[in-house]
Amino acid sequence: MTLLGLALVLAVGLAGPLLAAPAHARIPVVVGEVLAGVVIGRTGLGWVNPDEPVLSFLASAGFALVMLVAGSHVPLRRIAMGTGLRRGALLAAAAGLLAVPVGLGVAALVGSGHGALYAVLMASSSAALVMPVIDEAGLRAAPVVATIVQVAIADIVCIVALPLVLDPRKAGTAAIGALVVVAAGAAIFLVVRWFRGRGLLDRMRRVSVARGFGLELRTQLILLFALAGLAQVVGISVLLAGFVSGLALAAEGEPRRLAGQLFAVTDGFLGPVFFVWLGASLDLRALVTQPSLLVLAALLALGAIAVHAAAWLLRQPLALAVLASAQLGVPIAAVTIGTREQLLRPGEGGAIIGAALISVVVTGLAARAAQRSQTWSEKP
């Protein structure tokens, strides 16, 4: 991997912002970045080798940062509300229970042994997609609070469950490793909170701002990569380390300056490298030669929408129920781990990403329906 090759990766990654630029399109930036990777990777021109060690290493660091940002979007400080918390937990549990038979059924139809993985994918959601939509629309009523809680719980539970269902043979080892990473993340959170309570972090921030040291960002990256390194040692993907770090930020309340710095590093550099690498890793030619994979993509998308839309039977507004089916982080994590560990059959990763992109389109439609509704979206 040369600097010229890195420039190429970052240059083609600009397809993300270009596709996302039209405000009415509601296309996440990562969609264009993944598609750009597909064009220059295994499926397309072959300009980029995703197995190249330096690129793979940078992609791992980007993956950890992407998951940190995803975790920081989980609204932990906004869901500490009695009624909304209980109802949101009920909705998340209902979607999870429905996803199990649907996931197993889809696996049986397409002849795959990944029924548990499909169930986790269908039950998952994406706070990084849903929260901006809710904030932009200014929705604050009780059903919206329930949706926020539902999405947060689905994000957390599915991220933790993902490594366990991807390779059931190593579920015991993965569970122990996950506990180690979560415990280490909790310990770091408590230590940071202890320093904050004694005013040491505020003092460090003032010195950093005055002298231009960037100490907040440096500290956050040190903690993130230390936790990610621990995850690798215990045999767990860096996705959990990044997500736990993001949850710690969400719990404390991310300082605006640090948020801006993390945005610059993630969305300006390592994030695009990761998503272009992910697209380059996919071999979508199997989707053409194996129609069953196209059927799998459609079934995964429809299944996810159906298990979330069933919340309408629990008197949740249909637009919000469908909005909660937004998926991106968990499918991307599944494909990333599955590709690295060779746990997915050829083309299966492309089908999973395709299903996630379908859910993004449906989410945009649900968001518009939610904004048009005036009966439940008015503030109480």
Image (cartoon, helix red, strand yellow):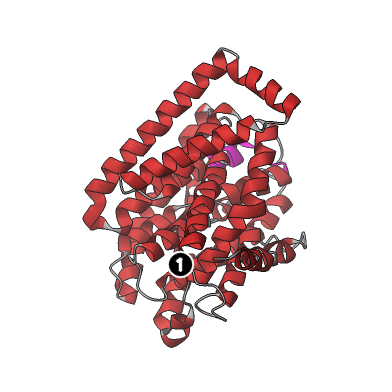
Q: Residue type at mark 1?
A: Ile
In the image, residue 193 sits, relative to residue 161, either above or below, namely above
Residue 136, position as x, y percentages in the image: 72, 46
In the image, residue 319 sits, relative to residue 148, either above or below, namely below
Residue at 53% over, 30% down: 251
Residue 89, position as x, y percentages in the image: 44, 39
Q: Quadrant of the C terminus?
A: top right
Main secondary structure found in the magenta portion = helix
| Nearer to us in this view, 84 or 174 | 174
| Nearer to us in this view, 350 or 376 | 350
Q: Secondary structure at mark 1?
A: helix
Identify residue for label 1.
Answer: 352
The region drawn magenta spans 138-149
Residue 148, position as x, y percentages in the image: 56, 41
| Nearer to us in this view, 156 or 7 | 7
Q: Is residue 147 magenta?
A: yes
In screen coordinates, is 116 left or right of 82? left
Q: Is residue 167 magenta?
A: no
The single residue placed furthest to the top in the displayed view is: 198
In screen coordinates, is 36 left or right of 119? right
| Nearer to us in this view, 301 or 74 | 74
The single residue placed furthest to the bottom in the displayed view is: 289
Graded by Cα atoms within 10 Å as few (under 14), some (14 to 19) or many (20 or more), the crowding at tag 1 reads many
Residue at 31% over, 49% down: 235
Residue at 75% over, 24% down: 210
Q: Is residue 226 visible?
A: yes
Residue at 31% over, 51% down: 164
In screen coordinates, is 164 left or right of 1? left
